[in-house]
Each structure stands twice: as structure tokens, then as C-alpha cells.
């Protein structure tokens, strides 16, 4: 049985993903267990999603919503900048919760090969759920005002996972377990259909300087890039860049013809 070796991009991606997973784990545990000499703040102070939720309240009142931090707004700005330059690479390279889902799915594939990922209009339609959740959370946070704890705190599976069993409620356990089970069925199921931050990043990605570009002249129509896409997208044709995570797997798959490329402001990335 021959084994496919990962390309350099994928090796770099895995190293970055592992590094971020380790970093967020250490940040969270350092704060929770107050290890000697530790100065790490609470996890909610390192959350660009929190920045999005609290931004309208901050603009309107100049106050920071309870259980969040001004740092969240700074991180949101950094995330928007990164996405504008590198596309949705935050999801493909940095987000530890995306990595966790991706690796759980890979683990499941070792035992059960079936690919149950949704495709086409159904997948596209369901992906709008992310935007609905995003708007609902922003409205709820704004309406409740700065003195009420951030509403998403009690629903956020990312936060729940990285609290490693602390500050959990039955509802949080239910959401976390459901999301992890979902990621065994659909690759990055939460990212694709539920993550409000992913929904936002997808919208910014539409205006990004970095893009996956297909040159129809040299495309043979083999469909290998579509087959490789973990999210069931179609980079060979019209790519839904609100869901693309810039993992680069489609570009690697197209190496032979070179039709698919990562471009920056219209020029091929070196
Ligand atoms: S979609 Fe959400 S959970 Fe998934 S990688 Fe992006 S930010 Fe992380
Ligand atoms: S279209 Fe390409 S870069 Fe985007 S998620 Fe699919 S394989 Fe990854």
C-alpha cells in the first residue's frame, strides 16, 4: 500500500496548527491553575469573536462588556488585517478549535473511511447559519448592555473545550459533545455550519488580496482539486470563498497542471 506524503505547505500548516494548539492550551491552563510566576489573563481576553460581540456596545457606550476585555477588540483588528492580507488562513492555520475538529475527523477516517460531507446547495444554504448566529450574538450582547456577562460565554464550545472541564454547565457539556461528535461525521462541521467567527472571516475573505485562482486555459477538468477539498468546495469552478479556509490542499492537488494557484493581488505567491 503506497502512502501519500504531505506537501511542504501541509507540513508547515500542521506545525503551525500544533504550535497554536499548544499555545492556547498553555495560556488557558496557566491562568486556570495560576502556576507560579504566571501572569496569563483569562481566555476570554484573547478572543477576536469576543471583540466582534462587544464592538457595538463599546462604540455606543465606551464600555467593555463584562467578562471580556479591550484586548479582544485589538485582536479583532489584527484578525481583520491578517484576513485581508492572507485570506482566511486564520481558520486553516491558526484556530486551535478548527485544528481540533480537523484532527478528530482524521482520526475517525482511520477507522471509518466513509465521507459524509455535505456538498452543493444544501451545504451552501446551511453555511448561512454562521451569519445568523453571528448577528444574533451581536444583537443580544448589544441589547443586554455592558453590565451583563457576554451571552456567548454560556454557549461557546471553543471556550468550553479550552476550560478542560472547569466552569462547565450541563448546556455547555451538551454543546461541546455535540460539536465534537459532529466533527467526527463532517470535517470541520462546526466551522462550516455554525462558527460565527468563521462566518465573519469568510465575509472579509471575499475582499482579501490572497486568493485561490484557477486558470481555465490550463485546467484539464480532472476534478482532483475538488476531491481534495476537505470542505467539499469546488475550486475547479466557482469557489465559495466564504467557506474556504486557505488550507492549500486543492493547489497541491493541481501541481501537475499548475492551473490552480495562490495569488496575491493578482500575482502568483512566490
Ligand atoms: S471557522 Fe471558527 S472554529 Fe473553525 S477554524 Fe475558523 S474560527 Fe476556528
Ligand atoms: S478550496 Fe482549496 S484552499 Fe479552500 S478549503 Fe478547499 S482545498 Fe482548502
Image (cartoon, rainbow, N blue to C red):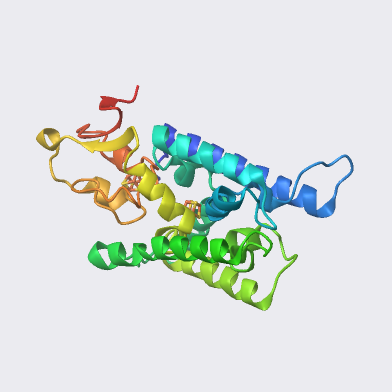
Residue 254 pos. (x, y %): 25, 38
Asked if residue 135 shows in the view, the reply is yes
Q: Tell me if 184 is positioned left or right of 69 in this view.
A: left
Task: Using residue 95 as the reference point, say whether residue 119 is left or right of it.
Answer: left
Q: Identify the residue at horizontal 50%, vertical 40% (top origin).
A: 79
Near-viewer residue (45 or 215):
45
Quadrant assignment for the C terminus: top left
For image coordinates 13% across by 33% down, the residue present is 218
The residue under the point 52% across, 67% down is 179
Height in image: 228 above or below 10?
A: below
Of all residues shown, which one is farthest toward the right?
36
Q: Position of residue 41 (x, y in %)?
A: 75, 46
Is 97 left or right of 26, judged from the image as shown?
Answer: left
User: Residue 230, how many percent across, how many down?
Assistant: 36, 53
Instruction: State the residue lying farthest toward the bottom.
Output: 170
Taking the spot 63% from the left edge, 59% from the top edge, the residue there is 159
Residue sitting nearer the eye, 109 or 16: 16
Q: Farthest residue toward the top?
A: 270
Residue 7 visible here: no
Q: Using the image as rendered, state which of residue 12 and residue 265 is in the foreground.
A: 265
Amino acid at each position: 500500500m503506497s502512502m501519500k506524503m504531505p506537501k511542504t505547505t501541509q507540513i508547515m500548516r500542521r506545525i503551525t496548527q500544533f504550535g497554536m494548539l499548544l499555545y492556547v492550551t498553555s495560556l488557558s491552563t496557566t491562568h486556570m491553575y495560576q502556576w507560579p510566576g504566571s501572569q496569563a489573563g483569562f481566555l476570554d481576553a484573547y478572543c477576536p469573536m469576543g471583540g466582534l460581540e462587544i464592538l457595538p456596545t463599546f462604540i455606543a457606550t465606551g464600555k467593555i462588556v463584562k467578562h471580556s476585555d479591550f484586548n479582544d477588540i485589538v485582536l479583532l483588528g489584527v484578525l481583520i488585517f491578517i484576513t485581508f492580507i492572507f485570506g482566511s488562513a486564520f481558520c486553516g492555520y491558526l484556530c486551535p478549535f478548527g485544528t481540533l475538529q480537523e484532527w478528530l475527523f482524521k482520526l475517525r477516517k482511520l477507522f471509518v473511511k466513509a465521507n459524509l460531507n455535505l456538498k452543493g446547495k444544501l451545504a451552501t444554504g446551511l453555511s448561512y447559519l454562521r451569519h445568523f448566529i453571528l448577528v444574533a450574538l451581536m444583537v443580544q450582547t448589544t441589547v443586554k448592555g455592558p453590565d451583563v456577562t457576554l451571552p456567548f460565554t454560556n454557549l461557546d464550545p471553543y471556550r468550553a473545550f479550552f476550560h478542560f472541564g472547569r466552569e462547565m454547565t450541563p448546556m455547555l457539556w451538551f454543546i461541546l459533545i455535540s460539536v465534537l461528535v459532529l466533527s467526527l461525521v463532517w470535517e470541520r462541521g462546526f466551522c462550516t455550519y455554525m462558527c460565527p467567527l468563521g462566518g465573519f472571516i469568510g465575509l472579509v475573505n471575499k475582499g482579501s488580496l490572497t486568493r485561490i485562482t484557477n486558470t481555465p486555459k490550463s485546467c484539464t477538468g480532472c476534478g482532483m482539486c475538488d476531491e481534495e477539498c476537505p470542505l467539499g468546495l469546488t475550486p475547479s469552478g466557482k469557489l465559495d470563498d466564504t467557506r474556504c479556509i486557505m488550507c492549500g490542499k486543492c493547489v497541491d492537488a493541481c501541481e501537475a497542471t499548475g492551473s490552480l494557484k495562490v495569488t496575491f493581488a493578482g500575482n502568483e505567491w512566490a
